Image: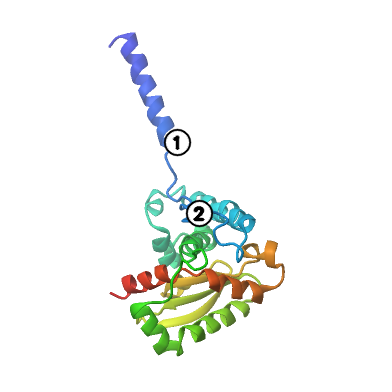
Amino acid sequence: MTRRSLLALAGGSCGAAAFAQTAAPPFSLPKLPYAYDALEPYIDARTMEIHYTKHHQAYVTNLNNAVAADAQLAKLSVDELLGRLNSLPASIRTAVRNHGGGHANHSLFWQTLAPAGKGGKPKGPLADALNRSFGSQDAAEEKLRAAAASVFGSGWAWLALDSESKLLIESTPNQDGPLLAGHRPLLGIDVWEHAYYLKYQNRRPEYLAAIMKVVNWDFVSDRYQSLTR
């Protein structure tokens, strides 16, 4: 083998090693489906930008760090990681719960919002299920707001499906979500202060009334149909 070919081989090996070291991490920030100011005047652009680029990005970064040392875990989706949380190594379980939960919750949250007047109304099977379970859409929204208002500190309120595909409204602390209880989330309301404090300060009920104006019911209706087929 010539000196040139040895150098080429060595260069290729170094290049492969460098590529391996810079390979994309398993989790990434999903694309926001609208501009930062699209939800105004209900959710302001600055809050959206900070919430998305700082808070959600931090959950993604820390989740990647948590699974970096285990190639098999890095192949799993965030929903799969949360679904088998109790079987994960104790050393990363809390990180996956907090940061994996934050990533999963926010990834759904962005999709369940839409500019005012663009998100439609509950339709088809979801509309029927809301009427059966809560009496009406208005009653369901009132119960969802009440669940969100009742969260002490930081957490979420959810419209979700239980193990029998029946609708339920529940709240969870911190970045826990329905997946940890074997439920499937349809719509989540973020009541961490970073979701609303710049505009609403301590006026959580005002924020909760506002966010219901920008729910993407078209997405939630389609998700309901997909999960109950």
Asked whether the beta carbons under mark 1 and mark 2 sit within 8 Å of each other, the answer is no
Residue at the spot x=39%, y=89% of the render? 132
Name the residue at the front extreme. Answer: 117
Residue at the spot x=27%, y=11% of the render? 1
Q: Amino acid at mark 1?
A: Gln
- Please name the residue that numbered disc 1 is placed on: 21
Name the residue at the right extreme. Answer: 202
Q: Residues within 10 Å of mark 2 (few under 14, many from 20)?
A: many
- Please name the residue that numbered disc 2 is placed on: 63
Expressed as whole percent of the image width and height from the top left, the position of residue 180 reads 46, 71
Expressed as whole percent of the image width and height from the top left, the position of residue 71 reads 39, 48
In the rendered structure, the answer to whether residue 229 lies left or right of residue 43 reads: left
Mark 1 or 2, nearer chain start: 1
Q: Amino acid at mark 2?
A: Leu
Label disc, if present, on residue 153 of the rendered structure: none
Q: Quadrant of residue 94?
A: bottom right
* Viewer-nearest residue: 165 or 5: 165
In the rendered structure, the answer to whether residue 4 lies left or right of residue 101 reads: left
Q: Residues within 10 Å of mark 1 (few under 14, many from 20)?
A: few
